[in-house]
Amino acid sequence: MPIHLCQNCGKAPATVHVTDVVKLHNENRERHLCENCAVAEGVTIKQHESMATALQEFIKQKAGIQEIAQVTCPECGISFREFRNQGLLGCPHDYRAFDKYLSPLIERAHDGATHHIGKVPTRAGGGGKRQNGLLRLKRDLQDAIDSEDYERAARLRDQIKSFERQGR
């Protein structure tokens, strides 16, 4: 078996093989990385590193730490620096205050989802599930528009119309 070089740095042997599942196109993309590049991307964690350290490194990589360290929540006053050091948010409003910096982390932790996709209480019946599904589609539509993914936005728009027609 030939030795593959890291697709990221092109120098070290690739020892970590990552398969990214792209739900939008229903395809899998394989990447071959060396250990250092995999750690830098947050794909693997060195054995001697704690999860908090890995989280800090991931956040530093994704955003200029100097720029965001001073961002604070207007409700509870916690700074992003405090969150980074403690690993805990101060209040529910922090998600909005730190959205730009938390979203990539949340997406990675929840397989691409940026909001809760959980169970609906049984007593809510099908209407609650329907309503949550419609709300999720509308949020996804707004995300697609914001990221200028107009093909996805058009598909979501059509799904929403179909969803709304079925509810009548």
Image (spheres, rainbow, N blue to C red):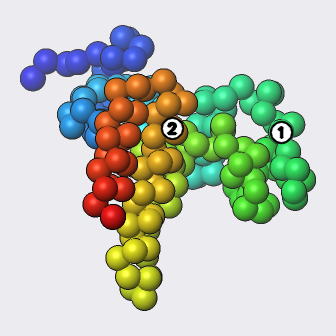
Residue 87 image offset from top left, x and y in percent: 70, 55
Mark 2 burial class by Cα count in 10 Å: few <14, some 14-19, many 20+: some
Q: On the image, which quarter does residue 154 sit in?
A: top left
Residue drawn at x 32%, y 41% as measured from the top left? 158
Q: How much space separates mark 1 and mark 2, taking CA atoms? A: 23 Å
33 to 112, vertically: above or below: above
Residue drawn at x 45%, y 40% as measured from the top left? 141
Q: Identify the mark at residue 143; answer none if there is no mark.
A: 2
Residue 54 image offset from top left, x and y in percent: 58, 44
| Farthest front residue in view | 168
Residue drawn at x 45%, y 64% as measured from the top left? 132
Nearest to the observer: residue 16 or residue 119: 119
Q: On the image, which quarter does residue 104 sit in?
A: top right
Nearest to the observer: residue 111 or residue 57: 111
Residue drawn at x 66%, y 38% as measured from the top left? 101
Residue 33 visible to an observer of this rendering? yes
Left of 103 or right of it: where is 72?
right
Picture quarter with the N terminus: top left
Residue carrying label 1:
71
Residue 15 visible to an observer of this rendering? no
Mark nearer the N terminus (1 vs 2):
1
Residue 147 image offset from top left, x and y in percent: 51, 28
Mark 1 burial class by Cα count in 10 Å: few <14, some 14-19, many 20+: some
